[in-house]
Image (cartoon, rainbow, N blue to C red):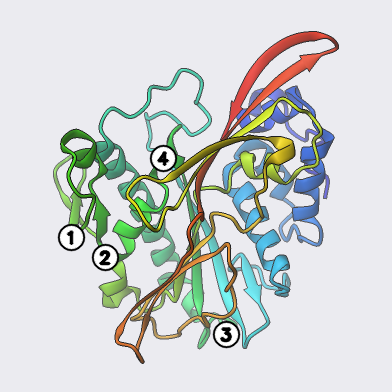
Amino acid sequence: MDLFTPVVEEAAQHPNFSTILKWPNGFNCDVLNEWARDFVDRDGKFVREFQTTFDSCFWELCLFAVLKHFGLSVDFSFPAPDFVVTDHGGMNIEATVASHAQGSSPEHAKKGAPIPADLNEFNRQVILRIRNSIDAKHRKFTDSYSALDHVKGRPFILAVTAFDNPYAILACQRDVEAVLYGYYVDEERFLQEGGQLRGQYLGIVKKDSGSPVPLAIFGNKDFEWLSAVMFSSCATWGKIRALSSDPNPKITFRTVKHNLTGVKAHASAARKAEYNESLLDGLRIYHNPSATHQLDKSIFRHKDVFQSYYSEQDKDWVYEDRDGLLLFRTVQTVLWKGARHVEAKKEI
């Protein structure tokens, strides 16, 4: 599958794909080609969609790479859902992306985009976009997937990520946890007032119209079909940059990582030669305690993967977490043409 030879005119290309063509880098292409190895374009549209819509296709390829990392086999003979996994008794994974609302700035419009002035308002919007994407898949499952023989009686996982605004990565896990559990941390209040940084229960968020949208879908009987949610705020082009063997010494990675012993996260910066990031860094698995078909917790267990689930034995929540888990990362690359400096390019 040739992802990089243009099959659409320049005017139809997604800005992210256009950037790849503008700054060709074989080291980056090698990583994405490896992700795509053995991926089957079932309807013959994937390359065109990759070049015109980009985000959802990129997310699918990242997920496929994760499945291969864990040695999981995908049966592409089924037209849907996205990944029919045949191991461990079988499971189904559907990918979805929270995209920007009509009239708002898309994820790729980073240059000159202002940093969010109010984290609560920023998070409200991201929460709504994630909830919208999950609701769309809920309707798809109810109307279509639930009747499929290879779906019946098996765990069903939604793989979600947010590409809904230029600063989507700043949300990290906050907004998806609000959607799934109603758990929310008011960092805006902490930044303004200080004190202790604590979580709280958030039952609803309101649309711009003022109508309420309920959260905590894992406590909702309508979502008992949903076994787990896979999520990552780090599945961006920066992941490709981190995994590539690009020898450019002018690549700098800035990261924020989980601090289990304090409020302040671990922040650091490193040049490419000293920076390490795995494919799995940033991946989070949230298990639905009310699911009809539970996902085996051992399938995606790894030191770089966060997992959350309820233990019936201990009657308490279990968080497979560690100090230093990646929350988000930015990449800055100084581009050169011969001996002449061209520009510094920031990627997330």
Mark 3 or mark 1, which has the lower sequence index?
Answer: 3
Q: Where is residue 68, by image quadrant?
A: bottom right
CB-based contact (under 8 Å), mark 1 and mark 2: yes
Q: Nearer the viewer, residue 281 or 56?
A: 281
Mark 1 or mark 4, which has the lower sequence index?
Answer: 4
Residue matched to label 2: 216
Q: Distance between the residues labelled 4 and 3?
A: 39 Å
Residue matched to label 3: 149
- Give amino acid for label 1: Gly
Residue matched to label 4: 170
- Give amino acid for label 3: Asp
Q: In this view, does 119 lie to the left or right of 253?
A: left
CB-based contact (under 8 Å), mark 4 and mark 2: no
- Give amino acid for label 4: Leu
Q: How far apart are marks 4 and 2 (CA)?
A: 21 Å
Q: Where is residue 229, by image quadrant?
A: bottom left
CB-based contact (under 8 Å), mark 3 and mark 2: no
Helix, strand or loop at disc 2? Answer: loop
Mark 4 or mark 3, which has the lower sequence index?
Answer: 3
Question: At which x and y percent is residue 212?
Answer: 16, 52
Residue matched to label 1: 203
The residue lying at 68 percent from left, 37 percent from top is 51
Question: At which x and y percent is residue 90?
Answer: 62, 83
Closer to viewer: mark 3 or mark 1: 1
- Give amino acid for label 2: Ala
Residue 279 vertical position relative to residue 126 in the rendered view, above or below: below
Question: At which x and y percent is residue 287?
Answer: 42, 74
Q: Distance between the residues labelled 3 and 2?
A: 29 Å
Closer to viewer: mark 1 or mark 4: 4
Circle 4 packing at 10 Å, graded few (<14), some (14-19), many (20+), is: some
Q: How far apart are marks 1 and 2 (CA)?
A: 7 Å
